[in-house]
Image (tube, helix red, strand yellow):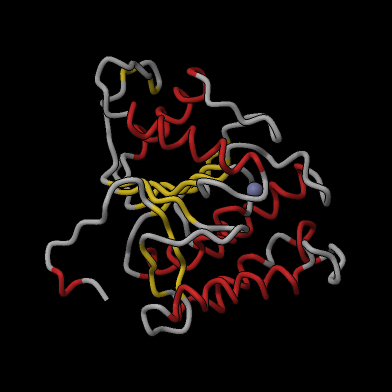
């Protein structure tokens, strides 16, 4: 199997909050997307791992992704260990993505930075033939995605690349609201309440969009520089 985007999130809902627009746009253009949740988000202040699991399934259906994987790492204690890197490498080789999305390089929740480091390192190591992983008893082929982009979630980070999601912004807000116990049923006046969350996401997406003359955009950082076949492809 070869897909377009393999999107990792420390917790169910990270990918939706930060990159649902790009995912919806990719799928609209007949792209294939898979999401991987590193944890079940069992330490979340609202709901529990069962409700979050159900909500993630609903969000997946709304996005139109072809699969969602759960790595069952420990929420609040994501570690960049050899064992965890092998779990990530296994999924990269299984899906052979063109690009990988990962958590923000620093953020309010400490798991996000840890997830970013784990995924970025595993993404490189996945291209090394002598690191062996197996799928149903068969040794997997090495695979390195073309790029790893870190989405921008809670804290503001200056992006290296922004993508126009204007046509998908409304649907993105609907997908986020699938996480009922996390956001919708939480107090609307609280920091994690749905109204504040959607306002914050809208503001961020507007700031990123303004720079390229569109209404809404999502922003990403990339360790290497951005390449284009033609300068005129960039806006
Ligand atoms: Zn998170």
Residue at the spot 39% in from the left edge and 51% down from the top edge: 149
Vertical arrangement, residue 143 with respect to residue 175, above or below: above
Quarter location, residue 177 = bottom right
Residue at the spot 56% in from the left edge and 61% down from the top edge: 156
List the single residue furthest toward the left.
230
Quarter location, residue 176 = bottom right
Vertical arrangement, residue 184 with respect to residue 122, above or below: below
Where the N terminus falls, by quadrant?
Answer: top left
Residue at the spot 29% in from the left edge and 44% down from the top edge: 2
Front-lying residue, 31 or 80 = 80
Residue 160 lies left or right of residue 102; in this view the side is: left
Residue at the spot 32% in from the left edge and 64% down from the top edge: 30
Where the C terminus falls, by quadrant?
Answer: bottom left
Vertical arrangement, residue 24 with respect to residue 168, above or below: above
Residue 79 percent across, percent down from the top left: 59, 26
Residue 190 lies left or right of residue 34; in this view the side is: right
Vertical arrangement, residue 174 with respect to residue 96, above or below: below
Residue 28 percent across, percent down from the top left: 38, 70
Residue 67 percent across, percent down from the top left: 48, 47
**Count of all numbered marks drawn on residues in the image:** 0
Residue 26 percent across, percent down from the top left: 37, 64
């Amino acid at each position: 199997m070869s897909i377009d985007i393999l999107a990792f999130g420390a917790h169910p809902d990270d990918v939706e909050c930060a990159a649902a627009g790009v995912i919806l746009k990719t799928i609209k253009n007949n792209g294939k997307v898979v999401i991987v949740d590193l944890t079940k988000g069992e330490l979340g202040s609202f709901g529990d791992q069962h409700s979050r699991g159900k909500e993630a399934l609903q969000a997946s259906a709304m996005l139109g992704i072809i699969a969602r994987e759960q790595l069952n790492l420990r929420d609040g204690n994501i570690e960049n260990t050899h064992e965890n890197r092998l779990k990530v490498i296994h999924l990269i080789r299984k899906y052979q993505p063109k690009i990988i999305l990962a958590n923000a390089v620093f953020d309010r929740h400490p798991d996000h930075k840890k997830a970013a480091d784990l995924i970025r390192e595993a993404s490189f190591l996945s291209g090394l033939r002598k690191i062996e992983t197996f799928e149903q008893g068969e040794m997997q082929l090495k695979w390195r995605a073309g790029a790893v982009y870190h989405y921008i979630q809670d804290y503001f980070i200056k992006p290296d690349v922004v993508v126009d999601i204007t046509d998908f912004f409304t649907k993105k807000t609907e997908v986020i609201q699938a996480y009922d116990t996390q956001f919708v049923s939480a107090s609307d006046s609280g920091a994690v309440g749905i109204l504040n969350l959607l306002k914050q996401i809208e503001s961020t997406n507007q700031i990123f969009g303004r720079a390229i003359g569109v209404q809404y955009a999502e922003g990403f950082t990339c360790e290497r520089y951005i390449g284009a076949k033609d300068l005129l492809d960039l806006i």
